[in-house]
Amino acid sequence: MPTGGAAAGSPGDTVAVPVLDPDAAAPASDSTPSAPSGQECPNCGTANAADALFCEACGYDFTTGTMPRKGEHASTPDAAPGNVSPPLDDTWVAELWIDPQWYAEQSSPDPLPSAGPPTVVPLRNTSLLIGRESKSRDIHPDVDCGADNGVSRRHAQLTTDGTRWWVEDLGSSNGTFVAGAVDPLPKKPIDVGVKHEVGADDRIYVGSWTRLVIRKAAPGEVV
């Protein structure tokens, strides 16, 4: 049996085993750490995941290229708080309905609120956020879906050229659905990150019971 510094080989042969000096410095590695992949926020410089829709640090919107919304200021007197997108020449509104039929198709544990007249929300800018408010995260959507917990904080984005409207899902938990005025309830959500044109009287469904319809404001409807 080999002993000491010898290792077994062919009969009669010994192989020297190198003895490492415990005080010797470790050899330098030729490899260098690879730079983290992702995207840098143009607003605050924070590195984010490559597929991030919003900056984790400041809330910058990578999808629309707009600055984070801040509740403490407005860009124009007619703008929603913190919305820095250009104002619209004509006033549009979104009607928010509580839709029992949509609720029946969902699996929400929340009780359905009493349905009634729609909540009318003025749409004064060319880019608007649909979602739910979060003061702790400084999220103040232009179209606030209130108590509907099926709606994500940053759920979808509405954009317009002043005549046509588009809706874009921002990676919401439960998706964004669009159907025509006389179509049955939609079964398939629109693709995430792709603008979907919304026609006249089309219905947008989000969350557990919320239905939105976009239209021009009636004379005197919005002050």
Image (cartoon, grey):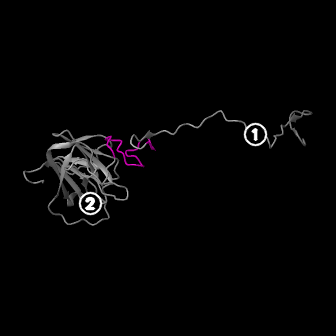
Q: Which secondary structure, mark 1?
A: loop
Residue 210 point in image, percent of width and height: 23, 56
Residue carrying label 2? 146
Residue 48 in sight here: no
Residue found at the far left of this picture? 219
Q: Secondary structure at mark 2?
A: loop
The type of residue carrying mark 1 is Ala
What residue is shown at x 40% (from left), y 46% (from top)? 55
* Residue 166 lies in the magenta-colored region: no
Which residue is nearer to you in this view: 177 or 138?
Answer: 138
First in sequence: mark 2 vs mark 1: 1
Residues in magenta, as a range: 45-67
Quarter of the figure with residue 87: top left
Q: Which mark is residue 25?
A: 1
> Is 6 left, or right, of 207 in this rendering?
right
Residue 51 in which image quadrant: top left
Up the image or down, 204 lies above or below 2; here it is below
200 vs 159, nearest the viewer: 159
Residue 152, placed above or below residue 22: below
Tell me the quadrant of the picture where the C terminus can be found: bottom left
Left or right, 135 with respect to 79, comes to: right
